[in-house]
Image (tube, rainbow, N blue to C red):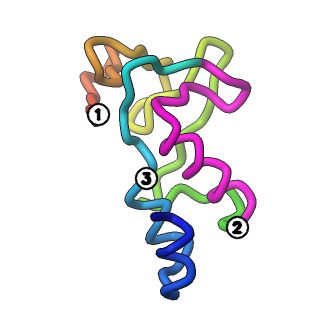
Amino acid sequence: LISLAFRAGVKVDKVVDQLIGIGGEHPVFQEGGLVLSIPDAIARVLQRHYLDDKSPNGNHVGVGLMGEECPECGQTISFEEGCMTCHFCGFTKCG
């Protein structure tokens, strides 16, 4: 479907918007942080190679030594019960 979208003229940022953050059954930590699923990984590659690593929603998501940083407070977030959760400020993202 991704290649079909590109052949139909859909812009890369719109595809990234739809794919990034999709959760999966077995998220993994990689050099770039927590990868939630294969679609999430594809979105990250598209983002890195075509969008200069700018987050599609304008929020910067950094990567700390222990994983991704919370976009709200900058502390390390954890992956629990299918959601990314910050225990410092309460930020939660599921998907």
In the image, what residue type sits under mark 2?
Tyr
Residue 19's mark? 3
Magenta span contains residue 40: yes
Image quadrant containing the C terminus? top left
Which element carries disc 2, helix, strand or loop?
helix
| Residue tagged 1 | 93
Mark 3 Cα shell of 10 Å, populated few (<14), some (14-19), many (≥20)? some
Label 1 and label 3: CA atoms lie apart by 14 Å
In the image, what residue type sits under mark 1?
Lys
Which residue is rendered at x = 52% and y = 87% of the image?
A: 9
**Horizontal side of residue 22 vs 43, given as left or right:** left
Say whether marks 3 and 2 touch (CB < 8 Å): no
- Label 1 or label 3, whichever lies nearer to me, is 3
Disc with the residue nearer the chain's start (1 vs 2): 2
Where 78 falls versus 37 (above or below)? above
| Residue tagged 2 | 50
Where residue 19 appears, as percent x and y from the top left, is: 43, 52
- Label 3 or label 2, whichever lies nearer to me, is 3
In the image, what residue type sits under mark 3?
Leu
Where residue 4 appears, as percent x and y from the top left, is: 50, 74
Residue 54's mark? none
Q: Nearer the viewer, residue 81 or 73?
A: 81
Where residue 61 appears, as percent x and y from the top left, is: 53, 41
For the magenta stretch, what is the residue range?
A: 29-49
Which residue is rendered at x = 61% and y = 12% of the image?
A: 66
Mark 1 Cα shell of 10 Å, populated few (<14), some (14-19), many (≥20)? few
